[in-house]
Amino acid sequence: MSRDIGADAHAQRQRIRRTRRVIHAVTAVAVLISAAVGADAVAASPAAPPPPPSTAEQEKGMRAGMPFQDPATVDATGSANPDLTLTLDAARSRFDVSGREVYGASYTGSFVAPTVRVAPGSTVTVRLVNHLPVATNLHFHGLHVSPEGQSDDPFLCVAPGESTTYRLEIPADHAQGTFWYHSHAMGTSCPAAGAMAGHDAGFMPGDVENQIFAGLSGALIVGDDRTLLPADLRNVTAHTVVLKDVQLDAGGHILQNTEANPLQSGNPTVRLVNGRLRPVLSMRPDETQLWRLVNAGADIFYRLRLDGRRFTVVGEDGTPVAAITTADELLLPPGKRYDVLVTAGGAPGRTVLRTAAYSNGPQGDTYPDVPLATVAVTGRPADRLPEPTGALPTAPADLAAAPVARRRTLDLSESADGNTFYVNGQQFAMDRSVFDTPARLGTVEEWTIVNHSGEDHPFHLHTTAFQVVSVDGAAQPYTHRQDTVPVPHAVDGVPGRVVIRVAFADYPGRWMFHCHIAAHEDHGMMSYIDVLP
């Protein structure tokens, strides 16, 4: 590879902010010529960096319009013993991306990691082997499992050449829906034992952005939420739709952060669906399908539309909804998932799944309208099925009337130069939380998340889903819980504000939270809350 997966620790500390708006300043260097020769002062300017390659240039060699294909699947849910054991080999890889040879990183040799399907009540054993030149680990995003020990503990660190084994005990009553897994490397090297034991080690930049962007992410499905739908809908075709993007150099290498060339998430990029460029998904006239939508990328947002059709939302962030809704568009920041029913038109034809033009704030990115896939409606018409309404079985209870044990405030901010990100004025530290007071199991807390910066920050909480109570002062009727919510940016000096309620249940330990723009968590916008029995 022309760019290594990750930089060394020194380069990580020195690299500037890698996403959002970066202005490449061309600084005039005054060269004073000796007065003895009577020359004037001359300003010499270094050459400006070359413009990034366009999306069209990066797509060269890719084949658009290939048939839609679900990711490979690892599945034990239909067997007599639903327990699942698998090995993931994190390694530099060369893989096929829509017909073009691309260099990045993978778990099994493909850009989109296999979809892992698990059953409620099962035990999932995952051996992670690190063949990378930097440290790595795993996070099972959205799962309600223990954050301690060899479970979903992001403080676990696997050094180059080492391995570890995760053991996830999936509760029998776990929500059925769509989750995902990805690297959560909180540094390019494993911290010293003292830091892990709680001794101050200072801030160390993470490597999450590099590793997710290179390819280390995939979908994870618990159970089958079709079983929660009315009987007529329980056998509809289901597809997993993993949204990831790549920025490529001329040699087909996925760009990585280096000290000299930091990633810019607003630069031209190639948006892919299950690793394919603008694939064609086939449906019959009037057919209804379940689409499991996953933004498994590092930094960028998707504003999804299906031209002429609507999305019927039955699950959000892996949690069955308490009120089924329909939407013309869905906003998926990094880490977001939706389970939606889609019904084709009654006549043969074609329509387009696209991400519409979108800006996440004046300090953030502005994305163009991009077609993602074509839906080809053809063949014998299907029986048109009634749209479901109401609540799905197992939807969690409304927390609006729950007693609130404690109220907390989280202030999200960033430095004026955009290099450093903060929660309550602090960068992430492994040895301390931004909260002095822990939470207690069996209680409900209300958190107000305040965004002082000029770009939206998608807030994510590990271990459980939460309920959004209000956004910028507007009360939100209860329809679902979620684990990721965009916190609006400040406008005219007035911060954006989201109020959530969190029910602490089942698991003591360190529950992490952070902005899910990976570059922001890597550079400090992350912390955790200690949860006690």
Image (cartoon, grey):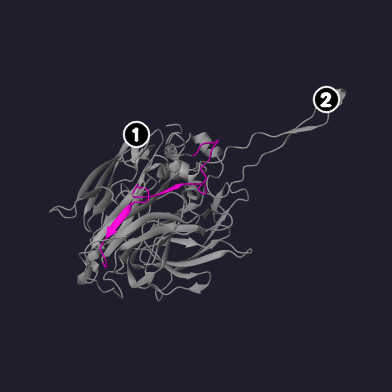
Residue 226, placed above or below residue 271: below
Q: Nearer the viewer, residue 198 or 158?
A: 158
Q: Nearer the viewer, residue 33 or 350?
A: 350
Amino acid of disc 2: Ser
Q: Disc number at residue 34? A: 2
Residue drawn 23% across and 67% down?
Answer: 381
Q: Position of residue 304 (x, y in %)?
A: 41, 60
Residue 258, placed above or below residue 304: above
Dot 2: what SS? loop
Residue holding disc 1: 131
Q: Nearer the viewer, residue 426 or 295?
A: 295
Q: How many marks?
A: 2
Say whether disc 1 or disc 2 marks the residue closer to the N-terminus.
2
From this viewpoint, which residue is outermost toward the front?
A: 348
Residue 2 visible in the current orientation: yes
Q: Nearer the viewer, residue 499 or 75?
A: 75
Which contiguous range is marked in magenta? 257-286
Q: Would you call the spot at circle 2 few (<14 residues within 10 Å), some (14-19), or many (20 or more)? A: few
Dot 1: what SS? loop
